[in-house]
Amino acid sequence: MAAINTFINKIGENILNPLIYLMFGVASLTFAWGVYMFLAHLDSEEERKKGGWVMLWGVLGMAVMLGAKGIVRVICGTIGVACPF
């Protein structure tokens, strides 16, 4: 059981954590780009709507990444191994 616990921790530390942080960063940049689009085109209803949609997708991406960490914790708790984060 110790070998499985070590293996899962290594996967979490070396693959899952960096991937989740990278995707959270991409979602944050997407949100920031949507804010820029919204504020830069205050006179155009269509461009503001596009900016709003980009912001929405950024927030949804961040929520999914936070949810992914929660799902991994639930799975680790269910199978009885230490969570990598």
Image (cartoon, rainbow, N blue to C red):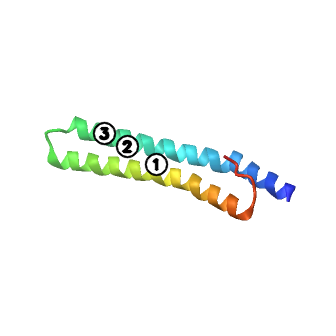
* Residue 10 image position (x, y, % from top left): 76, 49
* Residue 22 image position (x, y, % from top left): 55, 44
Left or right: 16 with respect to 39?
A: right
Query: At x 63% / y 59%, what residue is drawn?
Result: 74
Vertical position of residue 71 compared to residue 13: above or below: below
Quadrant that contains the N terminus? bottom right
Q: Nearer the viewer, residue 6 or 46?
A: 6
Left or right: 26 with respect to 75?
A: left
* Residue 75 image position (x, y, % from top left): 66, 61
Left or right: 48 with respect to 58?
A: left
Residue at mark 2 = 31
Q: Do callouts 2 and 1 mark residues in contact (Cβ within 8 Å)?
A: yes
* Residue 3 image position (x, y, % from top left): 86, 56
Q: Nearer the viewer, mark 2 or mark 1?
A: 1
Q: CA distance from mark 2 to mark 3?
A: 6 Å
Q: Nearer the viewer, residue 2 or 15?
A: 2
Residue at mark 1 = 62
Q: Mark 2: which secondary structure?
A: helix
Q: Do callouts 2 and 3 mark residues in contact (Cβ within 8 Å)?
A: yes
Query: At x 27% / y 40%, what residue is drawn?
Result: 37
Residue at mark 3 = 35
Query: At x 47% / y 44%, what residue is drawn?
Result: 26
Q: CA distance from mark 2 to mark 1?
A: 9 Å
Q: Amino acid at mark 1?
A: Met
Pointer 3 local density, CA inside 10 Å: few below 14, some 14–19, many at least 20: some
Q: Do callouts 1 and 3 mark residues in contact (Cβ within 8 Å)?
A: no
